[in-house]
Image (cartoon, helix red, strand yellow):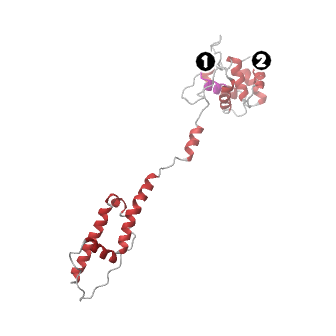
Amino acid sequence: MRISDSRTRADERRRLLRSVRLGYVKYWSAIENLFTGVPVDGPEPSRPKTASPEPSGLPFWARMSRQISRQPVRLVAACLASVLGPAMVAHAGSLSPQAPAHAATDVAASVVPASPLPGDAASWVPVAQDAAGACPGLPASVLLAIGEVETGLGASGAASTAGALGPMQFLPSTWAAYGVDGDGDGVADVTNPADAMHAAARLLCANGGADPARLAAALWNYNHSDDYVRQVLDVARSVPTPA
């Protein structure tokens, strides 16, 4: 008799859980393990042997009412899982990973000055300052002055009678020694403003241009003319840009 009662209760439990699952079949497979920590209902006290067996053939809702009274904890857990589970899954799906904060900083740090316009002094200032930064102590105004004296900051791009090229007027042999890729495009181009500015800074720096006491001598090595040195220094003093 006791074995029959146990089997009946097990059958009723399976039917109850199956009905709950079928009612929320859309979400159950995703959330049924969320509540594994719910305590199991305690064992039902054994009935006296004289107790009458559970009636058979009861309607479904009557059997469910009996099962609810016997296993309330499991049913509450199942209901909570079915109601709250979909909301938790939807909330988790709405979350998206945030881009690292340093990514924008890295992009900003990699930006190089835009290519300046021929003859537009204002657009050449960032390029000159960037090039002068490679030789601490060398004034950016001196680089701008050289470009102004040589070609009007690129306004006159023709080769000189001596064969000098580009906005800073480098002879091919001098460019071979001091030419540099100033804008990071992988090519050292004598006609590229950034490359030419960086090459001029490199030449001046190699001849002591970072030292104010040796700047005039560095300019003379750029162009062997005392008049040229005085002209560049005069123009540099009138250029409205930080040293």
Residue situated in front as seen by the camera: 191 or 229: 191
Mark linked to residue 172: 1
Callout count? 2
Kindly report the distance in space between the C-alpha atoms of the residues bearing marks 1 and 2: 23 Å
**Where is residue 55 shown, x and y percent of the image?**
22, 79
Q: Residue at x 59, y 23 (%)?
A: 192
From the image, tell me which residue sits under label 2. 226
- Give the magenta part as a residue range: 191-200
Q: Quadrant of residue 191?
A: top right
Residue situated in front as seen by the camera: 219 or 53: 53
Which quadrant does the C terminus fall into? top right
Left/right placement of residue 206 relative to residue 102 reads: right
Q: Quadrant of residue 158?
A: top right
Residue situated in front as seen by the camera: 35 or 118: 35
- Asked if the stretch drawn in magenta spans residue 229, the answer is no
Q: In the rendered structure, which amino acid carries the disc numbered 2?
A: Asp
Q: Residue at x 48, y 50 (%)?
A: 97
- Asked if the stretch drawn in magenta spans residue 198, the answer is yes
Main secondary-structure element of the magenta-colored stretch: helix
